[in-house]
Amino acid sequence: MDEKSKLKDLVLQAFHFRHATKEFDPNKKISDEDFRFILETGRLSPSSFGTEPWRIVVVQNAELREKIKNTAWGAYGKLPEASHFVLFLARTKVDTKYDSDYLRNHFKTFKQMPDEHMEKYLSRLEEFQKSDFKLLSDESTDKLDLLGKDRALFDWASKQTYIALGNMMTAAALIGIDSCPIEGFNIEKMNQLLEEEGLLEGGRFALSVMAAFGYRVKDPNPKTRRPFDDVVKWIE
C-alpha cells in the first residue's frame, strides 16, 4: 500500500471510530499535548472571508461545569465525566458586520492587508452581506437579537464554528479520542449564564455549539449511514 493509500485508510478509520459519545470514562484524561493538538486544528480551520468569527472556550472549572450541566439538558450526561468540555462562541454583529472595528483590526493586524486592498476587500464583504447572502436587516442595530432581525448575521458566524468543531472531532478521532457535539440547550438560558460568567464580553459573542471530549466507557453500535449513491449525485 502506497503512502497516499495509507493516509486515506487512516482518515476513514478515524471517521468510523468517531461517534457521538454519550458516556465518558471519568478516570481517563486527555493529555495537555493531545488536547493542544486538537485545539490547534480548530484554530487553523477555514472561515468565510477569513474572518475567524469564533472563540473556543475550554471549561475545566468544576463550578462552571456544574452550572452548565444544570442549564443545558444535552450536557447533563456528559459533565463532569468528560475530560474536556468546550464552548464554541460566535462573534455577533458588533464584530462581524462589514464596517466593524474588529474586522478592520483583524485584516490589518493579523492578515496584514495593505490599506487599499483592505478597503476593496471590505467593500466586497459589504456586498456579500447585503446582497449575496442577505445577512443584514434594513434596520441597523448594534445589539444582537438572537430570535429577531440580526439572527441571519449571527447564524452566518455560527456556521463557521461548526467547521472548527468538525475538524477538532476528526483530529481527536485520529488519535483515539472520543467526542460529542452538543446542541441540547436553550439558547437564551445558556447565553444568560455565560454573560453572567463574563464570557460573552457584553454582547460581542453568543453561544453557537458545545462539545465534550474524552474516552468512551463502551463501544458504540456499528455506524449507519444512508447509501453513498443516495447521498452523492454526479452531474456529468
Image (cartoon, rainbow, N blue to C red):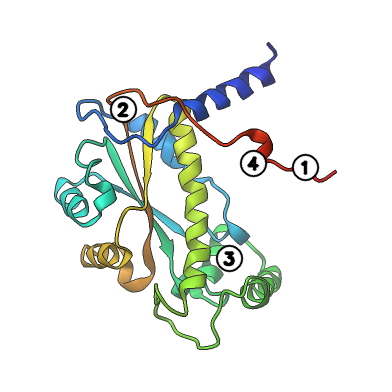
Is the C-beta separation of discs 3 and 2 under 8 Å? no
Distance of mark 4 from mark 3, alpha carbons? 41 Å
Q: Provide the residue designation for mark 1.
A: 234
Q: Tell me, for residue 231, which label it has, or none.
A: 4
Amino acid type of the residue that numbered disc 2 sits on in the rendered structure? Arg
Secondary structure category for the residue under label 4: helix
> In percent of the image, x 63 and y 24: which residue is there?
8
Q: Which mark is residue 108?
A: 3
CA separation in Å, label 4 and label 1: 10 Å
User: Split into 4 quadrants, where in the image is the N terminus?
Assistant: top right
Looking at the image, tell me whether mark 3 or mark 2 is earlier in sequence order: 3
Q: Nearer the viewer, mark 4 or mark 3?
A: 4
Drawn side of residue 9 relative to residue 82, left or right: right
| Label 1 crowd (10 A; few <14 / some 14-19 / many >=20) | few
Question: Where does the image place residue 201, in percent across and percent down from the top left?
Answer: 32, 68
Amino acid type at mark 4? Val
Residue drawn at x 55%, y 61% is: 51
Under circle 1, the secondary element is loop
Front of the two marks 1 and 2: 1
- Which residue sits at x=53%, y=74%? 97
Q: Are the two marked residues, 4 and 2, in contact with CB atoms closer than 8 angstroms?
A: no
Quadrant location of the C terminus? Answer: top right
